[in-house]
Amino acid sequence: MQHRTCNTLFVAILAFGSLSTTAQAGALTIGDETTDKGALTLSGFLRAKYQDKSWSDNDHKLTFDAAKVNLDYKSPKFFGHIEYRCYQFDKLCDFSSLVDGYVGYNINKTDNLTLGLQPVPFGPSRFWESNWYGGIVTQFGLEDVHNLGVKYHFQPFNATDVDLAYFAKDGGKYGSSSDASRYTANYVESLDEKNMWIARISKDLKLSEDGKLNAKVGGSYWYSDIDNKVNNLTGDRKAWALFSTISYDNLALTLTGGKNKVNNKDTTSPDISTMGSFKDYYDVANKGTFYTADVSYAFKNVGNIGTITPYAMYSTYKKDTEGFKDSTRSILGVSVDHKQLTFVAEYIMGKNDFNIGGTSASYGAGDDNGNNHLLNLQVLYNF
């Protein structure tokens, strides 16, 4: 039944994609967002991949990877957003998940309230990097996190943005008996993270009169309860992040650093906790410092090609526990945007990285697999 449903979804996406190319070169929009009735916009992508792994010979073929569908509603007072994704591991849509599903109210031009399953305002943005694979912090439930709650966004001063949010629980699991069948990396099995209080502030700085040199600086804080369902005790997570983005014309540099500190109230494993996402389980060190550096440059209007963006990223999680090995991930890549197509080539290097040839202990105590490498090639049709 799930396979048939996803096939139907796949065909529907292609149909809507065809409509979008005839209606306009991009997403399909019905209505006018400047009117009280508002506008509905359908967008998304279809993605295929080819991968070469230094630790495996099983992926030397072009395969369907993922589909994303966005449905957005906008009007002067109200807005809403749904993001749904399906992935192929062994067969079409054998993992699928609702990523976002929220509604919002615009109090004025700068302030709004958002309620539902939505991105957690921690760090510089939903994604801390310009690449497609993501940094190592995405595996620890701090980056690209989507939980269920309410957020108040406002601007107390000019060019200053503040987000205050409360998330009652995580986004939950989807379509499988596995507790790790989820998009966001969350604590799973014996641990349950809830009552998440998040605060973020950022300031935009205009550093040149011509408007080419700009910067953004900010910080965020995270406090939550972590229920240990084995002994019925409640621990906590305390995390913070400082970030800055400097851009000159088409060049951008983003730096993010912070601390993650988890008390899981587990007397047998106080230094590690089990997390899960995309049907995978893995251990994560409870205490550590994380850093991410990302640089990119967009060459726009390159002949008949479009936009070419080379980028580089380095991310690491330095663990506090003595004897634990630090985890690192580095990426060199380039993306090419040509009309509704995007081509991506990334060379990824990982050490003590579960996603790059490591073991389930990689983000915890570490593994003995050394440095692993992944060539990640992707092509996307955007609609």
Image (cartoon, helix red, strand yellow):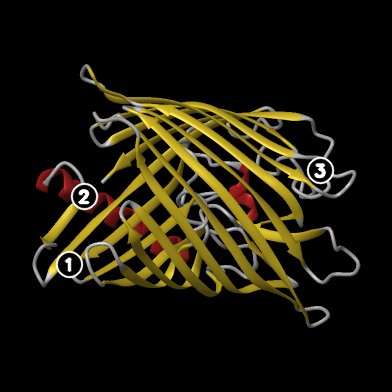
Query: Residue 338: image x %, image y %?
Result: 27, 29
**Of label 1 and label 2, which has the lower sequence position?**
2
* Residue 285 at least partly seen: no
Q: Alpha carbon of mark 1 to alpha carbon of mark 2: how far?
A: 17 Å
Outermost residue, top direction? 303
Residue 75, disc = 1
Query: Residue 323: image x %, image y %?
Result: 90, 43
Residue 39, disc = none
Query: Residue 80: image x %, image y %?
Result: 29, 68
In terms of depth relative to the viewer, which is nearer, 361 or 145? 145
Query: Residue 67: image x %, image y %?
Result: 39, 50
Q: Alpha carbon of mark 3 to alpha carbon of mark 1: how far?
A: 49 Å
Q: Are marks 1 and 2 in contact (CB under 8 Å)?
A: no
**Horizontally, is 188 left or right of 103 in the view?**
right
Residue at horizontal 23 percent and vertical 65 percent from the top? 73
The image shows residue 256, relative to residue 309, as above or below, that is: below
Q: Which quarter of the figure has residue 239?
A: bottom right
In terms of depth relative to the viewer, which is nearer, 89 or 73? 73
Using a 10 Å C-alpha cutoff, classify the residue at mark 3 as few (fewer than 14 neighbours), some (14 to 19) or many (20 or more): many
In terms of depth relative to the viewer, which is nearer, 146 or 60? 146
**Horizontally, is 87 left or right of 27 in the view?**
right
The image shows residue 125, relative to residue 53, as above or below, that is: below
Q: Amino acid at mark 3?
A: Gly
Q: Are marks 2 and 3 in contact (CB under 8 Å)?
A: no
Residue 27, disc = 2
Residue 366, disc = 3
Q: Amino acid at mark 2?
A: Ala
**Of label 3 and label 1, which has the lower sequence position?**
1
* Residue 111 at least partly seen: yes
